[in-house]
Image: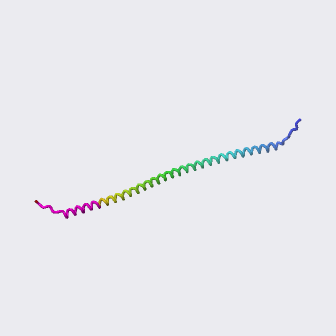
Amino acid sequence: MQPSIAVAPEALTITWVVVGSIILELFVLIVFLVRVSWWLSHRFTMIDASFLTVGKDVAQLKADISNDIAGRRVVAETRNDITELKTGLKDIRERVGRLEEHEDDRRTFAPAAEPS
């Protein structure tokens, strides 16, 4: 015959209490981990949305800056063109003035036409 092992009923109760508490702690741990992962996911989603918003703002600023730089280039080129036009007009005025002076000199020194 095999010797039988007798276990006191209190030992079985304590064993089930320990097993139950371990299962309960594991359940609480799983719930805690699910909540933490949900919170982290939510935070990362918010951070991604924030980065997207900031990225759009940066892209708009880059476009505005590019437009501003292009506009400044156009204004600088226009100023150069205006300066060249002013110089050209000044030369034309000087030439017209010299031509008028030359024509006046020709009229002054031209012999008077004799009436026939």
Q: Which residue in the rendered view is the most extreme toward the left? A: 116
Q: Which residue in the rendered view is the most extreme toward the right? A: 1
Total numbered labels: 0
Q: Quadrant of the C terminus?
A: bottom left
Q: Quadrant of the N terminus?
A: top right
Toward which corner of the image does residue 98 lie, by quadrant?
bottom left
Q: Is 88 left, or right, of 30 in this rendering?
A: left
Secondary structure, magenta segment, majority class: helix
Q: Is 26 left, or right, of 103 in this rendering?
A: right
Q: Nearer the viewer, residue 107 or 57?
A: 107
Q: Is 29 left, or right, of 92 in this rendering?
A: right
Was residue 25 drawn as part of the magenta stretch in this picture? no
Q: Nearer the viewer, residue 2 or 79?
A: 79
Percent position of residue 40, x then y: 62, 48
Q: Nearer the viewer, residue 116 or 42?
A: 116
Q: Is 37 left, or right, of 68 in this rendering?
A: right
Percent position of residue 91, x then y: 31, 60
Toward which corner of the image does residue 107 lie, by quadrant?
bottom left
- The colour scheme of the drawn protein is rainbow
Percent position of residue 102, x then y: 24, 62
- What residue is shown at x 73% (from left), y 44% (from top)? 23
- What residue is shown at x 22% (from left), y 63% (from top)? 105
Percent position of residue 88, x then y: 33, 58
Report the magenta residues as a range: 94-115
Q: Is residue 26 above or below residue 78?
A: above
Toward which corner of the image does residue 99 lie, by quadrant?
bottom left
- What residue is shown at x 87% (from left), y 38% (from top)? 4
Was residue 100 drawn as part of the magenta stretch in this picture? yes
Q: Nearer the viewer, residue 69 or 41?
A: 69
